[in-house]
Amino acid sequence: MTQRLCGRVAIVTGGSSGIGRAITRKFASHGAIVVVADITTDAIEGGRPVCDIVTEEGGKAVFFRTDVSIARDVDAMVAETVSRFGRLDILVNNAVLRAGKPLAETEEADWDRVMDVSLKGAYLCARAAVLQMLKQDVVGEARGRLIHISSQHGHMSAPEDFAYGVSKAGVAYMTRQIAADYAKDLIVSNAVAPGKILTGKGGRAVDPRWIEYSEGRAPWPRLGTPEDVANAKELTVITGKQKAF
Ligand SMILES: NC(=O)c1ccc[n+]([C@@H]2O[C@H](COP(=O)([O-])OP(=O)(O)OC[C@H]3O[C@@H](n4cnc5c(N)ncnc54)[C@H](O)[C@@H]3O)[C@@H](O)[C@H]2O)c1
């Protein structure tokens, strides 16, 4: 297999589980050095820590315990990445927390914790990454690339998941704003906005009511997998240019 990310240094936030886990494995399989920035090595869906799996598969992935909602954690994680691996080519802003409640049931604490991880965390990671990328040389066409995982629910309503939907709309906006401000510096900012992805997580994620809703919205005859998103990301990194929104 052609290793299309050979030697590139990538950070994947929330890389221990779900979609971030699949992105970590995909990037590592293409030769990237992947930093998994998560609060835990435990996978929500079960299984061994992703860095162990990548190592067994012959790739390179290291875990940095990082709470993306805390600026000093994020700044230290990016600084450590650069100190160990020399630069930062790719940030995947993927970490998420959901409350799964409509407006009237959303307590202030629910709002705060969803926003802290899903929106403020994306901002803190993007800021730390861009500050580093501005200091480094251009490789290929870009000085660095940001890939934000937004969601269909950043573009249309997220039924009974109020704070999450608002956070994802914020991520979609942030993607465009960063692209507009930093394209001149050859920093690429793109988003991938998946529909429903079956990650192996239980609870609300597999509630028949929401599965039926998602199947009703999806034109493809099956729902998405984490690998579907990882493949889209790989294409975004390799071919992605600034897109006009
Ligand atoms: N699964 C879906 O159906 C779906 C659909 C569209 C978009 N998305 C987006 O894809 C991304 C990944 O979703 P998923 O379903 O794989 O998520 P998940 O819940 O399976 O995994 C989230 C990961 O984020 C980590 N995390 C939580 N809080 C953190 C913090 N404070 N700091 C660092 N890491 C933290 C968790 O430990 C976990 O490893 C999210 O941005 C989500 O919005 C998911």
Image (tube, rainbow, N blue to C red):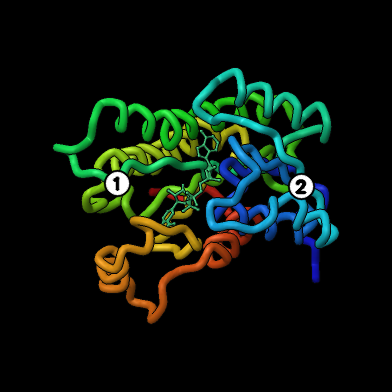
Identify which amino acid the numbered label 2 is placed on.
Answer: Ala
Which residue does the image show at 42% across and 59% down from the upper left?
202
Residue 153 location (% of width, % of height) = 31, 52
Q: Residue at label 1?
A: 100
Which residue does the image show at 77% across and 56% down from the upper left?
54
- Residue extending farthest top: 72
Q: Residues within 10 Å of mark 2 (few under 14, many from 20)?
A: many
Please tell me whether mark 2 sits on a helix, a strand or a loop: strand
Which is nearer the eye, 149 or 21? Answer: 21
111 relative position to 89: left or right: left
Residue 61's label in the rendered image is 2
94 relative position to 32: left or right: left
Residue 32 location (% of width, % of height) = 77, 51
**Distance from label 1 to label 2 (Cα)?**
31 Å
Which is nearer the eye, 122 or 132? Answer: 122
Please tell me whether mark 1 sits on a helix, a strand or a loop: loop
Q: Residues within 10 Å of mark 1 (few under 14, many from 20)?
A: many
Residue 186 found in image quarter: top right
Residue 140 location (% of width, % of height) = 74, 48
Q: Is residue 193 above or below residue 143?
A: below
Q: Is residue 84 above or below residue 208?
A: above
User: For the N terminus, which image quadrant?
Assistant: bottom right
Which residue does the image show at 55% across and 20% down from the upper left?
71
Identify which amino acid the numbered label 1 is placed on.
Answer: Gly
Which residue does the image show at 18% across and 38% down from the upper left?
105
Residue at disc 2, CB closer than 8 Å to ligand 1: no
